Amino acid sequence: MKKIDNLSIDSKLLRTFLAVLDERSATQAAARLGVTQSTVSHSLSRLRQQIGDPLFVRSGQALLPTEVALSLRKPVQAILDGIASLTDQRDFDPQQEAMQFVIAANDMQRDLIFPKLIQDLRSEGVSASFEFIASGHPSADMMRDDRCDLVLTPFPPNTSDVIQRPILSSRMMCFFDENTRSAPKTWEEYCNADHLAVRFRDGGTSLRALRGIDTSDFRPASITVPNFSAIPQFIKGTTLIATEMGLMQLKTLSGLSMESLPIDSDPVVIYLAWHQRSSNDPSHIWLRNKVRVIAEEVMAEWNSLSRRR
């Protein structure tokens, strides 16, 4: 590898490199960064000249990284983390700062928190940009590789460099259409019911959130859908049931009837998780506090609903 002119490589070039490394596509990297494809291509050309390696080679529609490119991920991420740490103690004004956040959350957590949060920000004159991606069963690498800033999930990675805090909690409940059936009254009836579940990209379903219950007697779900918002359309007019967090009665599943399960289950907790590199960044602290405030409002609404049932 030739000698590199360190001063000619700036953080924008490095962020472009990581985006292409993640997306394997100049087009998708450009969309992620909010720039044109030609800007990404120009940045890659500059990096190739400076590094002395092609970095990516085309294979069909994909850009495959070379061994050199793969070896650069961690040092490049470390450089960007170091640059970010320089601003940890900066003056921070959310109305003046250009902020962009990537949030990993399934549609249930997303819809409970962020529509209200963004409405509040707009009324305060804050124009932060948000990109939402599905979290599924998130890995620590999602945060280590800077693919997202925050994760909302019941399954946070259990690693020392990922920080997690509980923000939402409720028991699993049975959702159904009261016009076509009633809730299962016994465990046997519940196990033999026609179940619908959400299947995540890793192959697991939403039924794995049933904590402290042996589900080996379950009749397998006959219908699986890719997100929670699809549940009402499939359940209405049928005898299907869905077992999901009671909190979904507030938003995603508000059009369905809800009853307790015929057996006790442990509450499901939704965590807010982030990589330790962003712990002291003022914009990230500000966002996490905003999320916590909305989460407290959601829990107050859920507790009020629970008392009325």
Image (spheres, grey):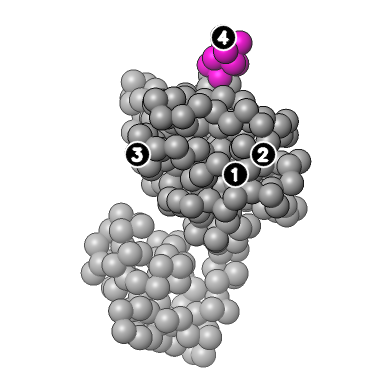
Highlighted range, magenta: 300-309
Q: Residue 46 occupies which quadrant of the picture?
A: bottom left
Amino acid beneath label 1: Asn
Q: Nearer the viewer, residue 192 or 108?
A: 192
Q: Residues within 10 Å of mark 3 (few under 14, many from 20)?
A: few
Going from the N terminus, do you reach mark 3 or mark 4 first?
3
Q: Residue 149, percent across and down?
A: 52, 48
- Which residue is pictured at 35% across the width and 57% down the height? 33
Residue 206 appears in the figure: yes
Measured Cα–Cα span from mark 2 to mark 4: 28 Å
Going from the N terminus, do you reach mark 2 or mark 4 first?
2
Could you tell whether 145 is left or right of 98 in the image? right
**Disc nearest the viewer among 3 and 1:** 1
Q: Which mark is residue 192?
A: 1
- Contact? badges 1 and 2 (CB < 8 Å): yes
Q: Which mark is residue 308?
A: 4
Measured Cα–Cα span from mark 3 to mark 4: 26 Å
Measured Cα–Cα span from mark 1 to mark 2: 6 Å
Could you tell whether 274 is left or right of 123 in the image? right
- Which residue is pictured at 59% across the width and 16% down the height? 306
Q: Residue 10, percent across and down?
A: 43, 65
Where disc 4 sits, the SS reads helix
Q: Is residue 184 magenta?
A: no
Q: Which mark is residue 233?
A: 3
Q: Nearer the viewer, residue 293 or 182?
A: 182
Q: Residues within 10 Å of mark 1 (few under 14, many from 20)?
A: few
Which residue is under mark 2?
188
